[in-house]
Every structure is written in C-alpha cells, then in structure tokens.
Image (tube, rainbow, N blue to C red):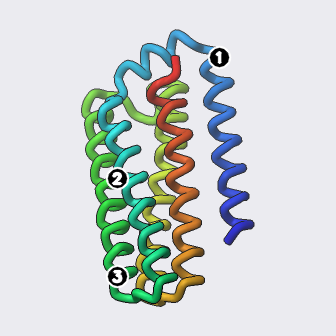
Amino acid sequence: MWVLIWSELLVFGAALCGFAVARVLDPQTFDASQAHLDRFLGALNTMVLLTSGFFAALAVRARSDGGITSSRGWMAASILVGSIFLYIKVVEYGDKLDAGFDIETNTFFTLYYLITGFHFMHVIMGLIVLAIVTWKNSLENLETGAAFWHMVDLIWVLIFPLIYLMR
C-alpha cells in the first residue's frame, strides 16, 4: 500500500507542478478562469474530506481498542461523509458545464478537470477500499484503508489552495 500511496503522491505532485508552471506562463487566463470557481464549495469539500478522514482515524482507534462494532460505525460515517464530497463535486462540475466551461475551454479548465477528475476517481476508489476494510474488519486492514484515505485527503488539501485560492 505504501508503494501505491507514494506513487500516487508523485503523480499528483507532477500534475500540480504542471499546473503551477502553466499558471506562470499564462497568469491572465488562469486568474480569469479561477474567478469562475466556487471557493465556498471547494472549502466545503475540504472540510468534508478532513471530517471523513477523522472518522476513519476514529475507526482505527476503536478497532485497536477491540471495538469491532464501533469501528464499523465510524468507518460507515467516514464513507457517508466521503460520499458527500462526490455529490458536491458533481454539483460543481454541473455548474461549470452549464456556464459553458468544459475541458476544452482553455488550459486552466483542461487542467482543472483533469486534476480534480483524477482525484474524484481516487475518492471513489477510496470509498470502495473503506467499504472492503469495514467488511473485513481487522486492525491491519483498517490501518491500510485509512492510510489510502488519508492520502486522498492530503491530495485535496494540496489541490484546493493551488487551484481555487492561489493567485
């Protein structure tokens, strides 16, 4: 799992570096395009993922204390809250598409959709992993699933300020 986590961090790191370089090369387009993003929804999604990650950590702690039922409850809460991220992101994508901003609009939106879309797929995969480790509820499985989920959180914590906030 750690090899996967490190490789994913390297891939996202390269994508975010590419975004930063593209921003330096065309700041006017990036500033104008970034103004169309919903910072509130981005911040809300940050809080959603951090809360979900906190619940996953509570599940691991509960399991280490011997509580299978409570660990499953915390992990179910983590999955539920993590699913809210997907809903908010779909709403945000819908708003952008309705406003005429798609993957071909400009370099900013191409990178926005590629990076956030790739992260979206990682959230889906992370939720599947969390469901599996909830079912196969051992401390080792929960720790492994939570480690992957925290990587997904960390990536969003990097994506949010770089794409939504930095000017």
Residue type, numbered disc 2: Phe
Which circle's residue, 3 or 1, is located before the other in the chain? 1
Q: Residues within 10 Å of mark 1 (few under 14, many from 20)?
A: few
Q: Residue at x 74, y 66 (%)?
A: 3
Q: CA distance from mark 3 to mark 1?
A: 48 Å
User: In the rendered structure, are the residues bearing label 3 and label 1 in contact, judged by CB atoms less than 8 Å apart?
Assistant: no
Q: Which residue is mark 2?
A: 85
Q: Residue at x 61, y 30 (%)?
A: 19
Which circle's residue, 2 or 3, is located before the other in the chain? 3
Q: CA distance from mark 2 to mark 3?
A: 23 Å
Residue type, numbered disc 1: Val
Q: Which one is in front in this view, the residue at disc 2 or the one at disc 3?
A: 3
Q: Residue furthest front?
A: 65
Q: Residue at x 51, y 59 (%)?
A: 122
Residue 70 location (% of width, % of height): 34, 82
Residue type, numbered disc 3: Ser
Query: Is residue 25 placed above or below 164 in the rendered structure?
Result: above
The secondary element bearing badge 2 is classed as helix
Q: CA distance from mark 1 to mark 2?
A: 29 Å
Q: Residue at x 29, y 56 (%)?
A: 84
Residue 17 location (% of width, % of height): 68, 33
User: In the rendered structure, are the residues bearing label 2 and label 3 in contact, judged by CB atoms less than 8 Å apart?
Assistant: no
Q: Residue furthest top?
A: 28
The secondary element bearing badge 3 is classed as helix
Determine which of the numbered discs, if any, sits on residue 24 in the image: 1
User: Can residue 108 be seen by looking at this rendering?
Assistant: yes
